[in-house]
Structures are given as C-alpha cells and as structure tokens.
Amino acid sequence: MSELINAQSLSDGFRRSLLTNVSVLALIGAVCAPSGSLASPDEDRPTVWIELGGQLERVDTPQTIFAPPFFDLASPSVNAPLTNAQRPSRYSPGLDGEITFAPKTTNWLFSVAIRYGRAKNARHLHYQTPGQPSSFGYKSGVRTGQVHKPILRDFGDGQTNFDESHLILDFHAGKDIGLGILGSGGNSVLSVGVRYAQFTSRSDATLHARPVYGHGPLVQTAFLGKYYTRHKPFHQTYTALAHTTRNTHAVGPSVSWDGSMPIIGRESGMTIAFDWGVNAAALFGRQRVHEAHQTTGYHLYYDVAVKRTSHYAHATARDRSRSIVIPNVGGFAGLSLKFPNAKLSLGYRGDFFFNATDAGLDVRDEANRNFYGPFATISIGLGG
C-alpha cells in the first residue's frame, strides 16, 4: 500500500516539476525573444520595398542672356526674338526610384533612392519691320517716286538649343521613432545619410540682326544721260554665335524626416494615409563653365557718292572652375493608398539648391537650382 502511495506522490511531483519547468522556459522565451519575433502583424510585413515613379517639375534654370553690343542699337521689337529665344525650358519630366530594406527583427530601414530629370528646348523666333523703300529718285529737284529695288528691313532672328539634366542620389539609414501622435499604423522615420547631386546644361545660340537701317543725305547720280538725286541707304548687319556648357557635382551629409498618418482604414487592410517629409543637406563640390562666343558685323554707308563698308569681329573663349558649398532643403506632402504589399502615392515635392550653378557668361554669377512639382509613385513589397 505504501508503495502505491509513494508511486502516486512521485508521479504528482514529476507533473508539478514538468509544469514548472515549462512555465519558466516559456517566460524566459517571452522575455528574451527579439522585438517582432512574437506573433504580430510585423511577421507579415514585407522586408523589401521597390518604388518607381515620375514627376513633372518646374525647373528654375537661371541663365545670363547673351547680349552682344549691337543689342544697344536695336529697338525693343528687334531685340525681343533675340532674348526670348534664349530662355530655357520651364518644365522637366523625369523618373525616380527607391529600394528600401526593412529587417523584421529591428525598426531600422536602409534605402537607396535616385531622381533624374531632363529638359530639351529648341526655339526659332523672328521679327522684321514692314520695310521701307531703299531710296527715292529725284529729277531736277522734284521727287519722281520710289526706285524699285529690294526693300530692306530691320529684323531680329534668334535660333537656340538648350539641354538641361539633373541627377540626385540618396543613401540613407533611418529608424522609426514611433511618435504616438500618428496613431495606430502610422510611422515617423528619422534618417541620416549621404546625398549626391549633379546639374548639367548646354546651350547654343545663333543670332542674326539688322538693328540699323536708314537713308543718308541726297546724292546726285547720272543714268542714261540724265541726272538724279537720291537718298543713299545705310545699314548695319550682325551675326552672333554662343556656345556654353555648365556642370556642378557635389556630395555631402544629409538628414530627412518622413512620416505617414492613416486617415481611413486599418493597418491590416487597405488604408488611405497622409504622407509628408522634410530634408536638408550640405553638399561640397565644384562648378565648371566653358563658354565661347563671337560676333561679326557688316556696315554699309556712303561718303557722299562713294560707297563705304566696314567689318567688325570679336571672339572670346574662357573656362571657369570653383569649389563650392551648396545648402539644400526640400520637402513633400501627399496622399497614399496602402495595401499590405503595395502602395500608390500622389503628392507635391520641392527641392531647393542654393548657389548651385554658375549662370554667368563673361563673369561668375551664382544662381539657385530649384525643382518643384507634382509626382506619382507605385511601391511593391517583397519578402513578407
């Protein structure tokens, strides 16, 4: 009988010991398990996000207008096509992409992003005056009417080609700092990293103008035994060519703060969220400019009855290079439609690079490069 009691006691003790040991092991596992290893929605979230998109950005590309000395002789109407043809394109369509790696066992994120935009512009503008007769004929001091010769006109003609591109690369490591004000399903990521920026442009201009045309004093000439007194014409005609290339390369530390706050829906299903972000960087690099331009002129006038001509020519070429520091700030705001493994975003973005380019011709002229406009992206999550 005692043996049965002892066996039952041993069995009860073994069960209690086994239950105690299992409970302790479970408690230790729960305490020591890494964040996200417990059953939670994080187990199903993707670890890699691939984002592709496009933007239509307004581009502020300042550029000094090539204005040879004969611009001072021309009327505003003649100068208008010469200057307006040199204005670069105001809009730049482009593409952007980003790859983000978000390990499940940590709230750190690592990303590589690229943005590229390019604008090409070709213009041909022309203006000419209605024209006037080349001269009038006189016989015995009496005006006999218009002499039928080709009518000369004041005119301005500008033909230009402009090509601009910009490239921005970002390498970031960020951490979700989890601000509670964003609510369930929201996130707030503070990132630090490196930004690289490249700005290039190329322009070619061909300008033709006759800014000066008129009639000189009366000059007596003989034709078929008769004497005529005529106004002899005079004019000045010019051609100017300009070629310019500019580029800036810079790299430096950057910081950004991005957030997303759900508006409609739940984290586990479809969600509409408000997205926002700000960024800042200090970029260190070099600006380079190569320019070459020339102007030629032809002058026709009369010294009494003697025809006189003169020619004008001027050409120059120079290169400039300088180390620079570019402060950069930007931001975006928009809405996104989120699914567990996909996201569609629409918004407005701006990036401002101060003193980023040398927009001058004969002398240095620092100018900002600004990009702002609407964008759209689509993201796919992998590895959930």
Image (spheres, rainbow, N blue to C red):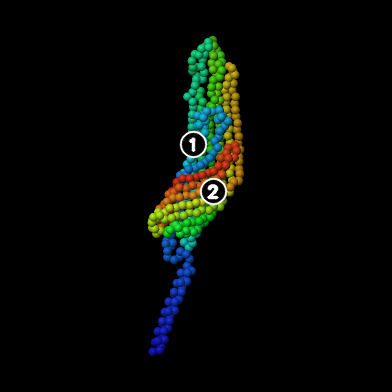
N-terminal of the two: label 1 or label 2? 1
Q: Secondary structure at mark 1?
A: strand
Q: Secondary structure at mark 2?
A: strand
Residue 333 or residue 248, whichever sits in front? 333
Q: Which residue is mark 2?
A: 328
Q: Which residue is mark 1?
A: 122
Quarter that holds the C terminus: bottom left
What residue is at 56 percent from the left and 17 percent from the top?
Answer: 217
Q: In the orientation shown, which residue stands out farthest toward the bottom?
A: 1
Residue 330 or residue 241, whichever sits in front? 330
In the image, taking residue 187 as reference, residue 288 lies left or right, namely right
What residue is at 57 percent from the left and 32 percent from the top?
Answer: 68
Quarter that holds the N terminus: bottom left
Label disc, if present, on residue 153 of the rendered structure:
none
What residue is at 41 percent from the left and 81 percent from the top?
Answer: 12
What residue is at 61 percent from the left and 44 percent from the top?
Answer: 322
- Residue 108 in percent (x, y) is at 50, 59
Q: Cβ–Cβ below 8 Å for labels 1 and 2?
A: no
